[in-house]
C-alpha cells in the first residue's frame, strides 16, 4: 500500500473521513468528516483564527452568507472567467480537465491506453441553484466559489462598525463550492470544501510590504502547526498562470503523497475587487484618510488556504510507522494543539473503571479526553497512537494507595509516574502551553 492508500484506509477505519452518502454509492467530490475528523478540522480552524485574528489588533472576523446577490459573481469575473478547460475521450467517454491528465489516466477502450480526446471546451465551475418560489433565470443564484467576495461587499460596514482603518484585515472561514470537472486525490480536490481567507486592506504604496509580511507569517503558521518544513516550498506564479485579479501571486506548496501541489495562495489583488464591485453596484468603496484627506481605493493582500487540503497535509506529515519493542505500530505525530483527542484515560483493569472515569470527567473540562477500558493495555496504547493522542494516563492497582498515575507520551512512549494532584497542571503545560 502506498502512503495515500494507508491514509484513506486509516481515515475511514478510525472515523476521520467517509465518502458522503456512502450507502447510496457516494457522490463524487463530497466527503463527510466523522467524529475525529471534525475535531481535527475544528482544531485547524481554531489555530488559523488564533494567528490571523485573535493575536492581532488589525484583523477582524466575518461570517457571511453562502449565497450572495448573483451580481456579485458577475462583478468578480467568475461568471465570465471562472472556467477550466474540459475534454472528453471519444472512446471511454471519460471527462477530464485538459491541464490535469496524467500518466495514470489510461483509456480502458484503446489498446495502447491513449485517449482520443476532443478539443478543450471551457466549463464554468460555479454551482448554480435557484432562490425563491420561481425557477426561471431571474431566480438563479450561485453557491460561492470562494469566501472572499462577501468580504469585499461588506468592507465598508466592517471597517466602520469595528472602528478599523487601513491597514486592516477581514478574515472568514467557510464553505466554498466548485463544480470541479475531475475531483480527485481524496479531499485534495472536492466540489464542496472549506476555505480560511483573509483580505488585508492597505494603502497602495504599502501593498508590497504587507505582501511580504503575510507571506512570512503564513509560512511560519504551517510550520508551527507541525507540518514538516522540508515538505513546504514557495511557488511564484509566472505571467501565464497568475489569476486575472492578481498583480503578484505566490503559492505555498506541500509535498503531498501524489506530488508537490498548492496548499495556500497569497495574492496581491490590488484594487481590482473593490473597484469592480463599486462599478457594478454603483456604491462607492473607497477610504478617505482623516489626517491627509487623501481618498483612495485600498489594495488588498489575500491569504487563502483550504481547510481540507491543510488537513490532508497535516495527516500526511504526521503519519509514521515505527517499532516499539519489536512490534510494528502506526502513529500520527500530530501537534498537541491539533490532535483530535488530547488525553486517553485508561484503567489497567475494568475493575478500576470507576475511579479512572472520575479522572476523565475532571480532565474533560480542560481538554478533549476519552475513557477506554476495553482490551489489553498495549492495544489501547496503539489505538491512541494511531489517532495521534499525545498522552495516555493509566490508573493501576497501586494508584488506589499512592494516588499516582502513569502518563505515557506518544512519540517516545516514555512513561512517568505522577501524583494525581499534579496531573492537570502537567498536561496543561504540555498540551496548552501554560
Ligand atoms: P487549484 O489550482 O488547485 O484548482 P486554485 O488556485 O483554484 O486551486 P484558489 O482559488 O487559490 O485555488 O483557492 C484557494 C485555496 O482553496 C487553495 O489553495 C486550496 O487550498 C483551496 N481549494 C481550492 N479549490 C479546492 C478544491 N476543489 N478542493 C479543496 N480545496 C480547494
Image (cartoon, grey):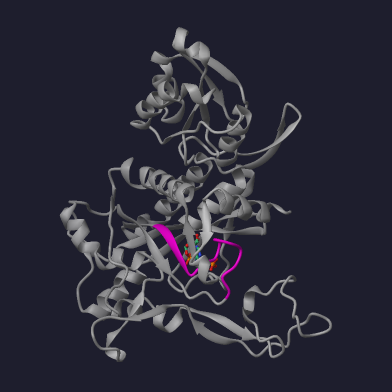
Residue at 60% from the left image edge and 53% from the top image edge: 254
On the image, the x and y values in percent for residue 70 come to: 30, 80
Q: Position of residue 162 (x, y in %)?
A: 19, 52
Q: Residue at x 63, y 29 (%)?
A: 378
Which residue corresponds to the image point at 30% horizontal and 67% vertical from the top-left?
150
**Residue 269 can be seen in this image:** yes
**Is the magenta region chiefly helix, strand or loop?**
loop
x then y, percent, for residue 145:
41, 71
Q: Which residues are magenta?
A: 182-196
Residue depicted at 55% across the width and 77% down the height: 181
Q: Position of residue 410 (x, y in %)?
A: 58, 30
Is residue 66 found left or right of 221 in the rendered image?
Answer: left
Asked which quadrant contains residue 227, the reply is top right
Left or right: 86, with 207 as reference point: right
Q: Nearer the viewer, residue 179 or 247?
A: 179
Which of the two residues, 386 or 394, is positioned nearer the viewer here?
A: 394
For the residue pair 394 and 307, the one nearer the viewer reads as 394
State which quarter of the image contains the N terminus.
bottom right
Residue lying at the far right in this picture: please name it.
Answer: 111
From the image, which quarter does the C terminus lie in?
A: top left
Does residue 396 lie above or below 275 as drawn?
A: above
Residue 434 can be seen, yes or no? no
Q: Is residue 388 above or below residue 420?
A: below
Amino acid at each position: 500500500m502506498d502512503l495515500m492508500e494507508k491514509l484513506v484506509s486509516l481515515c475511514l477505519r478510525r472515523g476521520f473521513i467517509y465518502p458522503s452518502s456512502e450507502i447510496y454509492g457516494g457522490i463524487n467530490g463530497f466527503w463527510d468528516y466523522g467524529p475525529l475528523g471534525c475535531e481535527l478540522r475544528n482544531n485547524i480552524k481554531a489555530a488559523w483564527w488564533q494567528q490571523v485574528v485573535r493575536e492581532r489588533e488589525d484583523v477582524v472576523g466575518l461570517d457571511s452568507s453562502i449565497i450572495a446577490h448573483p451580481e456579485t459573481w458577475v462583478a468578480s469575473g467568475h461568471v465570465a472567467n471562472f472556467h477550466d478547460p474540459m475534454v472528453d475521450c471519444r472512446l471511454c467517454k471519460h471527462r477530464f480537465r485538459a491541464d490535469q491528465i496524467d500518466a495514470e489516466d489510461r483509456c480502458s477502450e484503446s489498446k495502447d491506453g491513449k485517449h482520443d480526446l476532443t478539443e478543450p471546451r471551457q466549463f464554468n465551475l460555479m454551482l448554480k441553484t435557484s432562490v425563491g418560489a420561481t425557477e426561471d433565470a431571474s431566480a438563479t443564484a450561485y453557491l460561492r466559489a470562494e469566501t472572499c467576495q462577501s468580504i469585499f461587499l461588506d468592507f465598508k460596514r466592517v471597517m466602520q462598525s469595528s472602528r478599523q482603518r487601513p491597514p486592516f484585515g477581514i478574515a472568514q472561514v467557510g464553505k466554498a463550492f466548485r463544480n470541479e470537472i475531475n475531483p480527485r486525490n481524496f479531499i485534495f480536490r472536492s466540489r464542496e470544501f472549506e476555505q480560511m481567507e483573509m483580505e488585508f486592506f492597505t494603502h497602495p504604496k504599502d501593498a508590497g510590504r504587507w505582501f511580504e509580511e503575510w507571506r512570512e507569517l503564513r509560512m511560519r503558521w504551517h510550520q508551527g502547526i507541525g507540518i514538516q518544513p522540508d515538505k513546504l516550498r514557495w511557488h511564484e506564479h509566472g505571467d501565464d498562470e497568475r489569476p486575472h485579479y492578481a498583480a503578484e501571486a505566490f503559492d505555498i506548496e506541500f509535498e503531498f503523497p501524489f506530488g508537490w501541489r498548492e496548499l495556500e495562495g497569497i495574492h496581491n489583488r490590488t484594487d481590482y475587487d473593490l473597484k469592480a464591485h463599486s462599478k457594478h453596484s454603483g456604491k462607492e468603496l473607497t477610504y478617505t484618510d482623516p489626517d491627509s484627506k487623501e481618498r483612495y481605493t485600498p489594495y488588498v493582500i489575500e491569504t487563502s488556504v483550504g481547510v481540507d487540503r491543510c488537513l490532508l497535509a497535516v495527516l500526511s506529515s504526521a503519519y509514521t510507522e515505527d517499532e516499539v519493542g519489536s512490534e510494528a505500530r502506526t502513529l500520527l505525530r500530530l501537534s498537541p494543539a491539533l490532535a483530535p483527542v488530547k488525553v486517553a484515560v485508561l484503567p489497567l483493569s475494568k475493575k478500576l473503571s470507576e475511579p479512572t472515569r472520575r479522572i476523565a470527567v475532571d480532565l474533560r473540562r480542560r481538554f478533549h479526553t476519552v475513557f477506554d477500558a476495553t482490551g489489553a493495555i498495549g492495544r489501547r496504547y496503539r489505538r491512541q497512537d494511531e489517532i495521534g493522542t499525545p498522552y495516555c494516563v493509566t490508573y493501576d492497582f497501586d494508584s488506589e494507595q499512592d494516588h499516582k498515575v502513569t502518563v505515557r507520551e506518544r512519540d517516545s512512549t516514555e512513561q512517568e509516574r505522577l501524583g494525581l494532584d499534579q496531573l492537570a497542571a502537567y498536561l496543561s503545560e504540555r498540551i496548552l502551553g501554560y
